[in-house]
Amino acid sequence: MSDSKNLTRRELIGRSAALAVPTIVPANVIGKPGRQGANDRIRIGVIGTGGMGQNHVTPDTAAICDVDDNHLANARKRITQGEPFVTKDFRRLLERKDLDAVIIATPDHWHALMTVMACQAGKHVMSEKPTAKTIAEGRAMVKAARKYNRVVQIHAQGRSNPNAHAACQFVRNGGIGKIKRVDVWHPVNFSTDSWGEEQPVPASLDWNMWLGPLRWMPYHPLRAHFNFRWLMDSGGGFIRDRGNHALSIVSWLTDNDNYKGIVTCEAKGTPHLTGFYDVPATMEVTWQFRNPDWTLTWSQPGSPNPRFPGDWGATYTGDRDDLVVLGGDGGCDTERKAKEFKVPPGGVEIYRSPGHRENWLDCIRTGKRPVMDVEIGHHVVTLCILGNIAWRLGRRVTFDFARERFVGDEEADRLISEPYRAPWKLEA
């Protein structure tokens, strides 16, 4: 780590401002707030370059950050145009005035904090799913995006998939009639026989920075990188991971992105019998929506629809027909009847994204909101989080989306937010 280990948010903003040098540049070149100038190239930095982060590093990426030297070295090889700025401390990247935007591809527990700080530093953001770890984090992300007028896209890229778009147009134009229920199926969470005994931290990894706002825990390779998903502290299981993908498509097709009503949620599941992973081994969740009334379920393991089977997906059942949509990310697929559907005159035309990254960049130039705007992402991941909260409490919970509070349930309200390990603070 550099001597910036204890740099605060206010110091970051101050240092960023200090780097600004007044220059007289024609307005048509630099553009206006929310709109790039004609000669502007959107310069992007990537924070988190392992796993999915590798795919976000392009030949012209201007800056990269990762707490693992091996990830940084691999990412550096992918950049062939110019010399990128390279750091292990994301705050060094955010303070650079030559960057317009950042892509955040870190573990879940960093998404909210980095997004908020990036907005405060004047950067547009695309953050990997899931949107946030807690309901309070998601709201802070929305607040920061609006306060600082930044474009924040969540990388639940199914909304930029042409098959998902076809399914959305089919369902939203009454292809299955009035929706009665949606049933999502998915494989079970990962398991281990290990009890997580402390292991030596690899020389390439800054474990303290990897943990960041998480409570301290000893290093073990089955806690780090991809495996963080199987611990409630750092992950939340597949329901919050791929669930953010699957339920994004559900929310889109059912036209519930702006739902402000009441939802009840019940969950049951079996804990792991061995090892230190504390997400459930299996999980069944049911959400009940009101006005209009319909039911959403999540099953691990679930039963694929035999008519159009796949590893994970959902069956949408209406009062006239049903439709299967497989996946929820960039690999979505759906049945032929949706793909061949043509919107009738006067029907509902759903905006078709040119691609998830392309949509984000277009919105930076135009000031429009992207297809998976942070507020939509916050709404979607709240459903995932409700499932985990109901499972942890072992009972039904009732949530008011308008107030973003549980109904008459102080015990559940205490799980809306979680404390950060010092010195990290979420200040939107």
Image (spheres, helix red, strand yellow):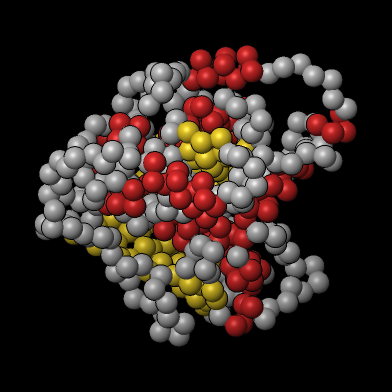
Tell me which corner region of the image, top left, top right, bottom left or bottom right, holds residue 168.
Answer: bottom right
Q: Which residue in the rendered view is the most extreme toward the bottom? A: 307
Answer with left or right where residue 310 lies relative to residue 19: left
Tell me which corner region of the image, top left, top right, bottom left or bottom right, holds residue 405.
Answer: top left
Residue at 77%, 43% (x, y): give it: 366
Tell me if residue 322 comes above or below residue 154 in the rendering: below
Q: Is residue 206 visible?
A: yes
Rendering coords of residue 368 (x, y %): 72, 43
Q: Is residue 377 visible?
A: no
Residue at 52%, 19% (x, y): give it: 12
Answer with left or right where residue 77 lies relative to residue 411: right
Residue at 51%, 15% (x, y): give it: 11
Answer with left or right where residue 187 lies relative to residue 370: left
Tell me which corner region of the image, top left, top right, bottom left or bottom right, holds residue 98.
Answer: top right
Quadrant into which the N terminus falls: top left
Tell me if residue 418 comes above or below residue 262 in the rendering: above
Rendering coords of residue 147 (x, y %): 62, 27
Rendering coords of residue 260 (x, y %): 53, 44
Residue at 28%, 55% (x, y): give it: 267
- In the rendered picture of this protein, how many numbered marks are placed on residues? 0
Front in this rendered view, residue 93 or 299: 93
Front in this rendered view, residue 118 or 175: 118
Rendering coords of residue 167 (x, y %): 60, 71
Front in this rendered view, residue 354 or 400: 354
Tell me if residue 234 comes above or below residue 333 in the rendering: above
